Image: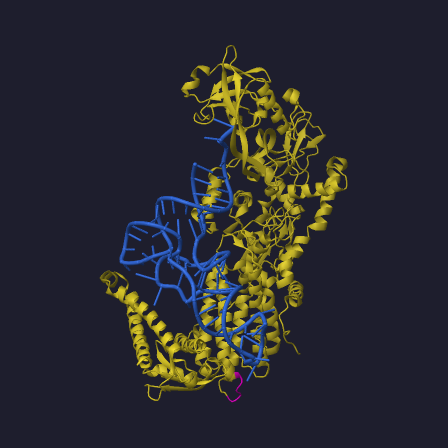
Chain colours: A yellow, B blue
Amino acid sequence: MEKELAKTYNPKDIEEKLYQKWVDNNYFHAEVDRSKKPFTIVIPPPNITGQLHMGHALDNTLQDILIRFKRMQGYNALWQPGTDHASIATEVKIIEQMREEGIEKEDIGREGFLERAWQWKDEYGGRIISQLKKLGSSCDWERERFTMDDGCSHAVNKVFVKLYKDGYIYKGSKIINWCPVCETSISDAEVEHEEQAGHFWHIKYPIAGGDGYVEIATTRPETMLGDTAVAVHPEDERYQDLIGKKVILPIVNKEIPVIADKYVDKEFGTGVVKITPAHDPNDFEVGKRHNLEEINIMNDDATINDNGGKYSGMDRYEARKAIVKELEELGLLVKIEEHSHNVGAHDRCHATVEPMIKPQWFVKMDDLIKPAVEAVKSGEIEIIPERFEKIYFNWTDNIRDWCISRQLWWGHRIPAYYCDTCGEVIVSEEEPSRCHVCGNTELRQDEDTLDTWFSSALWPFSTLGWPDKTEDLDYFYPTDVLVTGYDIIFFWVIRMIFSGYAHMGEKPFSKVLFHGLVRDSQGRKMSKSLGNGIDPLEVIDKYGADALRFTLITGNAPGNDMRFYWERVEANRNFANKVWNASRFIMMNLEKADLQEDINKELLTQADRWILSKSNTLVKEVTDNLETFELGIAAQKIYDFIWEEFCDWYIEMVKPRLYNDEDDSKVAALWTLNHVLIKSLKLLHPFMPFITEEIYCTLQEMTGIKEKGSIMISSWPTFNPDQDFAKDTESIEIIKAAVKGIRNVRSEMNVPPSRKATVLVVSDNERIREIFTESKVFFATLGFASEVIVQTDKSGISEDAVSTIIPEAQIYIPFADLVDLDKEIERLTKEKARLEGELKRVNGMLANPNFVSKAPESKIAEEKAKLKKYTDMMEQVTERLNHFMK
RNA sequence: GGAGUCAUAGCUCAGCUGGGACGAGCGUUCGCUUGACGUGCGAAAGGUCAUGGGUUCGAACCCCUUUGACUCCACCA
């Protein structure tokens, strides 16, 4: 079978084909297998309305790396995928689409609307899934779930009924955040506070039955239509005589009491506050304390209702203007100040939220949250990076009841049924046929649906079959890691944690890995309105999924935001190309030879031992980094190893052996190349799944690797004590330093590569001489040497030879006519200055009695060794310099 | 009003639990058709690790000050 890699790396040629192969072979699928340890990740379900953006790409790359790593390590790795119905986001989109067709929600009714919504889901819900596949995500697609599928819906109903029966869910009329555009209630978490420039209107309220006024200050004059009191601080000396009296509410012309409440800040404004219990959360609390009437003055679209008298029908801002105008005409407007304050906006549509009193369903949080707090405090759930714990606790410490009902149609309908005959409320998983109190068969289901996060809170166990006691649940739950952005810590992470404890009696996951946001090159959030978003699919199209993945996880610390640069993608594509070509080169050579399955260790040269040792260390480090979620560091190490150590040094060192059929060590070189390449590919696979698979499989067909099949199910490399050759690592490092020195001299002296020269190595150390003698062959190609002579002393070195000094040896290169004496003096002088600096530093340290007495022995020994090294080098450099100066 | 993050080479960032910044990529300069790769190879220039103090034998890293940028939370009307 003839098979080889294409001449140039073209991701498009391989990615789609390989993904299909993985799917066809069912490699992503995980079944319960008690003989293996499970490793489970549940995907943060993307919205069915969604299109893959950079945030998804990052999030899913991280998960895929962890899953592929663990799968190779032999775990039974399950990556549970699915999508979220995203109630409000989807509903808004469908309404928009309908509007274009001139249809309103009411025209088609609830059922008609839901039919459309399911059609929408069928049409667009799969789009993001296919995009995740382009990224290489190894999700178990057979298990794909949807937050509104039968199983998840069943779980939702079960949880609702259970929490209701246990007294955690209740219905109540409370002040909630109302979005007048979406016309639904929203939770506190969905309100974004934006600083806005506004005004502070100072208004006079006449004191009833007397003359005089109190001056109040407000940012929202229109709400005065609903004022039912005026409040002062109980200890405010200025207003003591007012407490208990009444003032006349202007425009409305009715008397309202002056009450005393500690909520009022004496220092702020005038110290007198108008109280509108129906349209301000604080006033609502004050109203409850003082038994004040709650007058709702607004309709659901934030126009003024009939309680607003002549302002009825006006929009809230129109009414504001008109009311200010009237107050001015009445002579009751004292002044208008500029005032910037925070205004709550709906995070979806950015409309200013209106606090309103509405009957809604709530989850009582104070007890439910306790185990979730304890879990993080005790370390049972680990948050990475740690600093996000503070954000977590900040929220849990100030937790308020969760408003879960929404006045929307797309979502899980609340399983509560009302009997209009006797007023009974029945909460039940199945629709009751009749009222259990009065027997009425005409029951009416609650119109509201649940907050979309209510169902995603159950995701880690509802996807595994809960409420049924399934094998899957028993085996895969609790899951191992949750990977997500820090922006949904309140919406989702906390709610999953408390839900896990409430319904499973166990944590949903052991670790939470937070990542940052992907920003544009100027550090701005990518957003539709700015038009600065970069489509991951475009990146994949141009540079391949492997390059994109690598870009997203390198050069960035965990939890920090990162900027997206095309240049970085290109650099990583270049790396992929490097891997590709290095592999081609190795294959070209393997093809012509008989590859040994195993090698006699005696045949390995210094260089072989060196690279084996290096790759061995790499395996250990990368594994450690992955275990501790330092994915970027792991990737960087693999990159450096492959490019620098393996390609630039080892492959170059080995070339002379490959080109020489007489060389006894050729077989060892081939074996080592193959061995290290396979190991590198495996380490790289979780990061760059496609290219590694393509190369691995090609290599397999060519050479017959023992391990058959896909790299994604091959075994993860482990540290091999047999390949730990520390001594050889040192010798090659000496050779590398010598080669670098030679290259540097040649470059500085402008000696063209075509000009070969003799290299004389001088050392009085026998071991060093051995190392150089053994490595002579490297200098021909790497150091442009025509000949290498290793000797004990400086005899026979020509007068005009230039030199490079490394700690272990002096290296002389006679260039004769090419030598520019002044340049060499300049170079040596620079070197001397550098060494002087080093010596000064080392001597300084060693001369410090405190250092010598307090620093650890090893550190002192290290510095002493350096002193000797630099002293020796200085001696050689000085001698050389004197030689030319005289 | 709280809390957090960041300030390191021209640009974007790494630097793990304190021990010389061989920092990385891009960019810049110089030189290379070296039989895998110019999506490449070799060499080089470039940093007061924001500021001021403290702890320490030793600080980019720990503590405090200041300045600047960003983010989250928060009911001051």
Query: Residue at left 39%, top 75%?
Result: A730
**Magenta region, main secondary structure:** loop
In the rendered image, the vertical position of residue A282 relative to residue A845, given as above or below: above
Return the x and y of residue A132 as percentages of the image width and height: 63, 56
Q: Toward which corner of the image does residue A221 lie, by quadrant?
A: top right
In the rendered image, the vertical position of residue A877 relative to residue A847, given as above or below: below
Query: Which of the two residues, B48 or A68, is positioned nearer the viewer here?
Result: B48
Return the x and y of residue A87 as percentages of the image width and height: 65, 42
Query: Which of the two residues, A875 or A391, is positioned nearer the viewer here?
Result: A875
Return the x and y of residue A190 as percentages of the image width and height: 57, 39
Is A308 contained in the magenta span?
Answer: no
Q: Toward which corner of the image does residue A541 lie, by quadrant?
A: bottom right
Query: Which of the two residues, A332 or A231, is positioned nearer the viewer here?
Result: A332
Residue range of the region highlighted in magenta in the rendering: A658-662
Residue A112 horizontal side relative to residue A864, left or right: right
Screen quadrant of the N terminus of chain A = bottom right
Q: How many marks?
A: 0
Screen quadrant of the C terminus of chain A = bottom left
Residue A721 horizontal side relative to residue A882, left or right: right
Query: Residue at left 65%, top 67%?
Result: A14
Residue A372 in view, yes or no: yes
Return the x and y of residue A160 as percentages of the image width and height: 60, 38
Residue A710 in view, yes or no: no
Query: Which of the two residues, A784 or A31, is positioned nearer the viewer here?
Result: A784
In the rendered image, the vertical position of residue A381 relative to residue A320, given as above or below: below
